[in-house]
Image (tube, rainbow, N blue to C red):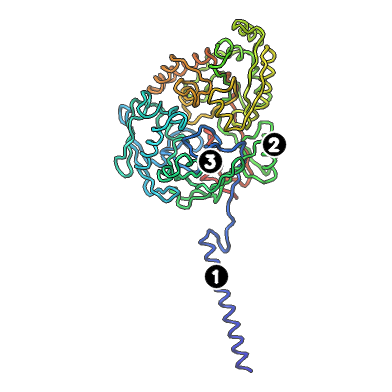
Amino acid sequence: MGKKKFLSWTFLLLLLVSTALYGCSSDEGSKEDGGEGGSAEEKQLIFGRGGDSVSLDPITVTDGESFKVTKNIFDTLVNFGEQDTEIEGALASKWEPSEDGLSYTFTLEEGVKFHDGTDFNAEAVVKNFERWAAGDGEKFPYYGSMFGGYGDEEGHVIKSVEATGDYEVVFTLNRPQAPFLKNLAMSPFAIASPTAFEEAGDSFGDNPVGTGPFKFVEWKRNDTITIEKFDDYWVDGEPKLDQVVFRAIPDNSARLNALLSGEIDLADGITPSDGKTIEGNADLQLYERPSMNVGYLGMTVTREPFDDPKVRQAVNHAIDKQAIVDAFFEGRAEVAKNPIPPVISGYNDSIEDYEYSPEKAKELLAEAGLPDGFEMELYAMPVPRPYMPDGQKVAEAIQKNLADVGVTAKIVSFEWATYLEKAANGEADAFLLGWTGDNGDADNFLYTLLDQDNVGTNNYTYYENQELHDILIQAQSEVEEDKRNELYMQAQEIIHDDAPWVPLAHSTPLLAGGKNVIDFKAHPTGSDKLAGVDLE
């Protein structure tokens, strides 16, 4: 009996020791998985936004909702500063321009991987630019807007892109381009995996592959886009989050309620009226995006009666812009008189804005042969935008202003991607839209949005003026800042007189987040990199 009891106690002791050892082994395994003494809770950030993306192939789109996601899947050759548009290194660690401004030599980061495991190198950069240059305005609208054309077209700025080593690329230009580096930092010119886009073709935007801090997981249309941490990201210590979910919530009130209830961690498109609610809640924080935008009413100048400058000038006089800013921006915007905001170098403050004058509007309509006014369709945005938190209400205010001068405007709207497509195709009489600057340069507003080179892409109004075109091309090629600014001031005078737009407002966009969100930095371009963001 005694011997058996001893053996039983020995067995029990061995069992307890093995259990303890197993527990230690499990703890050590958790550490390897990111935990300390237990499995770590996954850090998932849910970003509520006003609309869905159009595509996740950044070169094919121009909308901010797409770039909001692609900014975190892809990297560019050079980056903007944390909250400005100063140029910093990214996939290129350094660069050297030639004295004549006709070539740039880039030294690339080594050891960088695409999400599909392939290598980032000079050849990958060349293949991306060859892909874009072989396209057209319909496929890759931003490339032509920023680099003057495609392939062998006369205005095309980029002559060649050559790999002169495994990690060295030389860009040769047909003419100097002052904002060249800033253009390269823009979200559309993110470097994608050649293996992935060659295999996927036109469907690459449904399964994007970059070198960015997060890799694509899933897209539920008009609902959510999920991206997750890329463990082999080339920047040490980033990203801090394990997963980001972009959730489309078009209704402003519903998005705010989702933030208040904790369903989402971040929300953009916060209306100025809701800003006070956020500031009064100890569990939330309000972010102001540095203002670099314009909201406007565009008139398609190829459609009657907007082919007559007097009609367009009449519409400018008919709209009470100050009342719109007071009613819908609540002190977080200023009335616009030019297509570029005052923070952009080259802004022409000497231009005298069209005064709000229904009487003057009626006089101009009579001079244009329309004493009894006319009927039109007015496109109202279906989603909140940084430059216009509530497009529907702004449209209603404009509708009333136009009615006061005899113009009957029927408000119509469409799903966001359709809205942009129809406006780009010139199908709208007049439309509400806007622009958040991509690179902090006047060229990115004036040439991109109003030059004849970009009709049908970013120039939705189909406005053309040869004198303006010549000035804008000269300004692109001029490297002396004062001379560039003089040219841009001349350009704004021409645009003001021709009046293809009614510039409405330069806003200070608002975002909000929970107090648990750490180190979120709202960027003036509207494309926020989330690699440095953390959750408490």
**Which tag is nearer the camera, tag 1 or tag 3?**
3
**Which tag is nearer the camera, tag 1 or tag 2?**
2
In the rendered image, which residue does mark 3 sit on? 69
Could you tell me which residue is drawn at 55 percent across and 11 percent down?
308
Q: Residues within 10 Å of mark 2 (few under 14, many from 20)?
A: few
Badge 3 element: helix
In the rendered image, which residue does mark 1 sit on? 24
Q: Position of residue 51 (x, y in %)?
A: 60, 36
Residue type beneath disc 2: Ser
CB under 8 Å between discs 3 and 2: no
Would residue 443 be visible to someone looking at this image? Answer: yes
Q: Position of residue 138 (x, y in %)?
A: 47, 30
Q: Identify the image quadrant of residue 40.
A: bottom right
Would residue 524 be visible to someone looking at this image? Answer: no
Q: Residues within 10 Å of mark 1 (few under 14, many from 20)?
A: few
CB under 8 Å between discs 1 and 2: no
Query: Tag 3 or tag 1, which sits nearer the N-term?
Result: 1
Residue type beneath disc 3: Val
Q: Identify the image quadrant of residue 46.
A: top right
- Pick whichever, 89 or 69, lies toward us: 69
Q: Identify the image quadrant of residue 63.
A: top right
Q: Residues within 10 Å of mark 3 (few under 14, many from 20)?
A: many
Could you tell me which residue is drawn at 65 percent across and 36 percent down?
250
Query: Tag 2 or tag 3, which sits nearer the N-term?
Result: 3
Which label sits on residue 253?
2
Q: Is residue 157 left or right of residue 307?
A: left
- Point out the image quarter for the N terminus: bottom right
Mark 1 vs mark 2, CA separation in Å: 50 Å
Query: Tag 2 or tag 1, which sits nearer the N-term?
Result: 1
